[in-house]
Image (cartoon, rainbow, N blue to C red):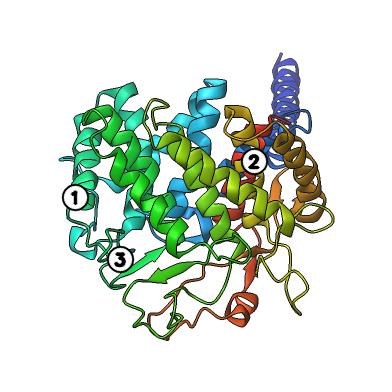
Amino acid sequence: MGKSLSTTVNFAKLILFFLLIFANKTNSQNQLETENSVISYDLKWSERTALSILNKYPQAWQLDGNDRPKWDYKMGFVLSGFEKLYQKTNDKKYLNYIKEYVDGMIDSTGNIKKYDIKEYNIDYLNPGKLLFNLYDITKDSRYLKIIGELRNQLESQPRTASGGFWHKQIYPNQMWIDGLYMAEPFYTQFTVKFEKGKSLDDVAKQFELVQKHIVDKKTGLVYQAWDESKEIGWADKQTGTSPTIWGRGIGWYMVALVETLDYFPKSHPKYKVLVGYLNQIAKNVNQYKSESGLWYQVADKTELYGNYVEPSASGMIIYAFAKGANKGYLSASYKAIAKKSFDSFIKEFIKVDKKGVVNVLNVSSNVGLGGKPFRDGTNQYYLTSKTKENGAIGLGAFLLASIELDK
């Protein structure tokens, strides 16, 4: 009897031993599968890119290698792609990614953390665009409050003598080309939604000032900035423009136009004027692409020593071409150009790792003008700015182009 019991106990121990081995093996296998989980090549580039961003940057404030949360135009740019992808797929994970970022940046009473209106930083308006849809979906009054606060910033934003918004309080009398993207789509959406369009002429005026003062008469392309007072060190003493025609600057301007036109009523007299500006710059920038269909860091000097094709500029221009054609602002021929350039973009700039994660190579780092130490805005300054893998503007531009081309 004792021997039989002992045999049973030993047999039970043996079974337990094998069960533990099996469980450990299964756990290890599950862990391995999680570690080796891949983003499917069968998905469209838009979803592959979005899933890659979620994989790399679980919190959107981590984009661009940030080490702490901040209310930032780069996050706003990338997340505008997530908003478009959510509208296309109805997949809640894209909406949640936006909402988590915004909710982390505002307090319980509806204030943006560390926001100071007195900085008059026009970049702060860009993430504000995300709040229109968030408010419509959630009816969270905090989002509406912040939309109003950002509109109030524009109301008192300092202006040049001729009425252009300063880029920041610390850059007096200066309009920067990226400021058109930061402010005008937000401004247009607000004035149409809440003010019966009363400020549409003012929106159009910002673009008119660009056409008059920032567009280069020879190439039809845009400089990065214009100082109406002509006092800052980088400004041309005759025209007030900065020295370089920057590829990403052209991208910012074209995206500003196509996204402002999303909300600008066709019945308004300035609608056709804005469409005309888009056609003008599209025609001109198309003359300056590489043989494979990409655009350069210094956009007008394609043969300049050290010049290189740059992904954020190329991605934005591809997006603007595709969206312009899809919306009927540009002729259908620009869609064909966008498709060819998109294929070249993938060959030149995209690296997919073993897990299917999409990486964008050689994105120009952030560049600016003035400040301390002083940034002189020469061609050489732009060409010696470092490049990096997965710079947020490069990722965002590729995501937007992918969504628009649906490839």
Give the residue type that dot 2 points to. Phe
Residue 48: horizontal and vertical position, in percent?
A: 68, 36
Q: Residue at x 66, y 61 (%)?
A: 389
Q: Quadrant of the N terminus?
A: top right
Q: Earlier in the sequence, mark 3 or mark 1?
A: 1
Q: Residue at x 71, y 51 (%)?
A: 286
> Which residue position holds label 2?
321
Q: Earlier in the sequence, mark 1 or mark 2?
A: 1
Query: Which of 153 and 285 lies nearest the eye of the viewer?
Result: 285
Vertical relation: 328 (above or below) 300? above
Quick check: can you spot residue 352?
Answer: no
Vertical relation: 96 (above or below) 210? above
Badge 2 element: helix
Residue 106: horizontal and vertical position, in percent?
A: 26, 45
Marker disc for residue 108: none
Badge 1 element: helix
User: Is 379 on the left-hand or right-hand side of 215?
Assistant: right
Question: Are dots 1 and 2 in contact, CB under 8 Å?
Answer: no
Question: How many angstroms separate mark 2 from mark 3 (CA)?
Answer: 29 Å
Residue 396: horizontal and vertical position, in percent?
A: 57, 47
Question: How many angstroms separate mark 1 from mark 2 (CA)?
Answer: 32 Å
> Which residue position holds label 3?
168
Name the image quarter holding residue 385. Answer: bottom right
Marker disc for residue 155: 1
Give the residue type that dot 3 points to. Lys
Give the residue type that dot 1 points to. Glu
